[in-house]
Image: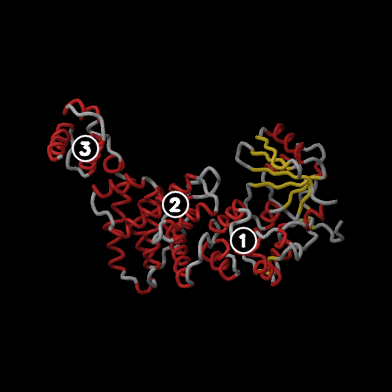
């Protein structure tokens, strides 16, 4: 085992950590490792608990699930790894130690800041054989656990970008070299991702980080972007504009949601957004905080959509296939990109057009609005923006479009129909078919536009429409 003495530190562990320690028959055989320890050192909240044990990880996971009323799942029978999901959504993974001892297990990890451990019966002592604490707090350096850390698992190259950004670390020269040398190893001989799900999760971790545009620029410098791209990488100027659009969208979503601070809207361009759209701040915060069943956020998908660009709609579909996104995510990407394209062609200006827009795209049209704004701002330097025209766009088009969805949904977006198909068939002796559907759609549009308000008016309109056929 390592010769370096354990360090005594003051940790503020979540209650679940103490509960786990108190419910193990022999906590001296089990260790907290990885992100939970790293985050505890810098006083960050963490809801995922990783443990390793000299015992049987599957058996211990099952026992903890029974004792602490969690749901048990066997993850990897070969590595004896089990998972427990507790009622408060805390996630616990416990694996049997790889190699002969704890130090061998830690040295097989990715980076030194993730290779620290704490024994469950000594929750104030840090085991740190690779000096991860110094790298995290003093030298501020992201360093591999071994020269082969990235070579043996190239997905760690993408994770390195996110971790360095998240903790404000510079990459050690050998880490940078390893990323550049092994980037192409993410692909197989046919140019497809070897492990698309893991690449996807690492890439979304970057998009969900504090500076997604900075992460993408780092990926570009390190040769990762051309590997992650699902098609021929665009020209450098186009990539730069797409990354700028990501940066702007991230800023827009920060200032229109509850996480905004006083400095976010200091710039006039974004200050106008706040003044015009702040009334929808709560609703937009709820919209963009949505999470798909797989845990990926709607905001990250919106950033991917603006990065793929709406000028070529199939680009987003290529990303969806390349990264093995779910059907729901694919539909969201397709709707958001298509709605962006429609807005760029002609922004809706009245109730009838608002109704048509949301009938086509539903709530995904909200995402499209902000992708459209980000793309618009990315095409010219912000210093050259005509702020009067920008204000007119927000006040005259974007605000009413959002107001239609969030304040007048039952009037404009989805009003209770004045007529049904049965009404048309009975009143005009029609046969069921496409004609009935087209008339109902036209009547509903007129209702959303405020042109008709009663069933009698709806029947008169239907009669005119049928006569014109």
Q: Which residue is mark 3?
A: 439
- Please determine whether, in this image, residue 82 is positioned above or below residue 384: above
Q: Disc 1, disc 3: CB below 8 Å?
A: no
Quarter where residue 192 is shown: bottom right
Q: CA distance from mark 1 to mark 2?
A: 23 Å
Nearest to N terminus: mark 1 or mark 3: 1
**Where the C terminus falls, by quadrant?**
top left
Q: Circle 1: is it few (<14), some (14-19), or many (20+) Cα within 10 Å?
A: many
From the top left corner, tell me how far across and down residue 458 is, in percent.
17, 35
Q: Residues within 10 Å of mark 3 (few under 14, many from 20)?
A: many
> Is the residue 238 above or below the residue 403 in the image?
below
Q: Could you say where residue 378 lies in the image, as x and y percent from the top left?
A: 40, 67
Q: Residue at x 53, y 58 (%)?
A: 207
User: What's the distance in space between the residues labelled 1 and 3, CA to CA?
Assistant: 53 Å
Residue 382 position (above or below residue 28): below
- Reading the image, the residue beneath label 2 is 333
Could you tell which of marks 1 and 2 lies nearer the N-terminus? 1
At numbered mark 2, what does the secondary structure look like: helix, strand or loop? helix
**Residue at x 62% of width, y 61% of height:** 158
430 or 292, which lies in front? 430
- Residue indicated by mark 1: 158
């Amino acid at each position: 085992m390592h010769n370096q003495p354990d360090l005594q530190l003051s940790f503020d562990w979540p209650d679940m950590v103490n509960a786990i320690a108190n419910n193990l028959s022999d906590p001296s055989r089990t260790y907290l490792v990885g992100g939970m320890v790293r985050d505890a050192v810098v006083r960050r909240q963490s809801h995922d608990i990783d443990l390793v044990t000299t015992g049987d990880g599957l058996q211990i996971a099952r026992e903890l699930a029974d004792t602490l009323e969690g749901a048990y799942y066997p993850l990897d029978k070969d590595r004896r790894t089990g998972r427990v999901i507790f009622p408060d959504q805390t996630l616990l993974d416990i694996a049997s130690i790889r190699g002969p001892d704890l130090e061998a297990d830690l040295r097989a990890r990715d980076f030194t800041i993730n290779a620290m451990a704490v024994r469950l019966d000594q929750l104030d002592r840090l085991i740190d054989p690779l000096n991860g604490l110094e790298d995290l707090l003093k030298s501020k350096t992201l360093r591999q656990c071994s020269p082969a850390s990235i070579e043996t698992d190239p997905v760690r190259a993408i994770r390195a970008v996110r971790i360095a950004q998240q903790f404000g670390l510079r990459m050690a020269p050998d880490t940078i070299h390893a990323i550049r040398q092994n980037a192409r190893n993410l692909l197989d001989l046919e140019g497809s991702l070897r492990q698309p799900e893991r690449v996807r999760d690492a890439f979304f971790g970057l998009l969900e980080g504090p500076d997604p545009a900075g992460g993408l620029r780092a990926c570009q410098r390190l040769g990762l972007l051309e590997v992650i791209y699902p098609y021929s990488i665009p020209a450098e100027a186009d990539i730069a504009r797409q990354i700028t659009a990501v940066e702007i969208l991230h800023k827009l979503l920060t200032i229109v949601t509850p996480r905004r601070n006083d400095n976010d809207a200091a710039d006039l361009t974004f200050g106008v957004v706040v003044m015009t759209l702040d009334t929808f701040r709560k609703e937009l915060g709820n919209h963009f905080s949505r999470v798909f069943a797989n845990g990926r956020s709607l905001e990250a998908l919106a950033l991917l959509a603006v990065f793929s660009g709406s000028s070529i709609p199939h680009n987003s579909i290529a990303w969806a296939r390349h990264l093995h996104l779910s059907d729901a995510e694919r539909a969201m990407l397709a709707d958001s990109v298509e709605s962006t394209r429609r807005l760029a062609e002609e922004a809706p200006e009245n109730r009838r057009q608002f109704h048509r827009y949301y009938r086509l795209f539903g709530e995904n049209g909200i995402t499209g609005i902000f992708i459209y704004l980000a793309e618009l701002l990315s095409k010219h330097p912000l210093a050259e923006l005509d702020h009067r025209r920008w204000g007119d766009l927000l006040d005259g088009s974007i605000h009413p479009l959002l107001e239609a969805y969030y304040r007048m949904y039952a009037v404009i977006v989805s009003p209770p129909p004045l007529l049904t198909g049965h009404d048309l068939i009975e009143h005009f002796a029609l046969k069921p078919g496409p004609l009935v559907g087209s008339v109902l759609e036209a009547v509903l549009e007129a209702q959303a536009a405020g042109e008709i308000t009663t069933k009698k008016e709806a029947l008169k309109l239907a009669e005119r429409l049928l006569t014109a056929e």
